[in-house]
Amino acid sequence: MLYSGRVTGFNRIMILGIDPGSRFTGYAVIDLSNEYVTSGVINLSSKKEFKNKLFFLSQQLDQLYTQYNISYLSLEKIFLGKNADSAFKLGHARGVCLLSAGRHGAHVFEYAAKYVKKIATGSGSSDKLTVQSILNKVYQTQILKEDESDALALAYCCFTQMTNVDRGLENFRI
């Protein structure tokens, strides 16, 4: 089926951007007409055992998929930092995100952080505040949390790739 314009109601095609983390996971939902729907941060309290954090994350993601009928997941690729333990925990959180996408039949797109910054700002070396500022202007939001704005940047990156903005929506097939 050829996509030919704005989609409304239950037929809206939703993109979920997720900035995974073992303490905080940012999320943002936009639709395929590039309209902001919602965003926030899932707080994975440091008082819980790690397995319980992952279970809670899974529950929260299931609610998002169900409430917004998510079709596409845009997820940040894993990167190796200085702390191996943190990288492993991040990998587990990403695994939960991928599992949730699979459970709900969503298509998954993964992007490197530098690539997302380049799409959002024109420069892969932009700082988080610049990305946040630009996206707040684009979507007319007042997002202040980095995890949340990173998730919105991921959703926006997926949107631009899927719709091929330079050539228009007429080339996008679903």
Image (cartoon, helix red, strand yellow):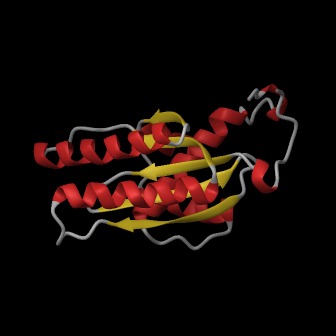
Q: In this view, does 147 lie to the left or right of 107?
A: left
Q: Is residue 56 shown above or below 6?
A: below
Q: Is residue 120 shown above or below 137?
A: above
Q: Is residue 78 left or right of residue 173?
A: left
Pick the quarter of the image with the N terminus: top right
Tell which of 148 and 44 is nearer to you. 44
Of all residues shown, which one is farthest toward the right? 4
**Percent of width and height locating residue 118:** 52, 41
Tell me if I can see residue 124 in this picture. Answer: no
**Percent of width and height locating residue 3:** 82, 34
**Percent of width and height locating residue 4:** 87, 36
Q: Is residue 55 shown above or below 119?
A: below
The residue lying at 25 percent from left, 70 percent from top is: 45
The residue lying at 76 percent from left, 26 percent from top is: 173
**Percent of width and height locating residue 47:** 17, 72
The residue lying at 41 percent from left, 52 percent from top is: 19
Tell me if I can see residue 12 in this picture. Answer: yes
Pick the quarter of the image with the C terminus: top right
Tell which of 114 and 4 is nearer to you. 4
Residue 60: name its quadrant.
Answer: bottom left
Residue 52: name its quadrant.
Answer: bottom left
Number of marks drawn: 0
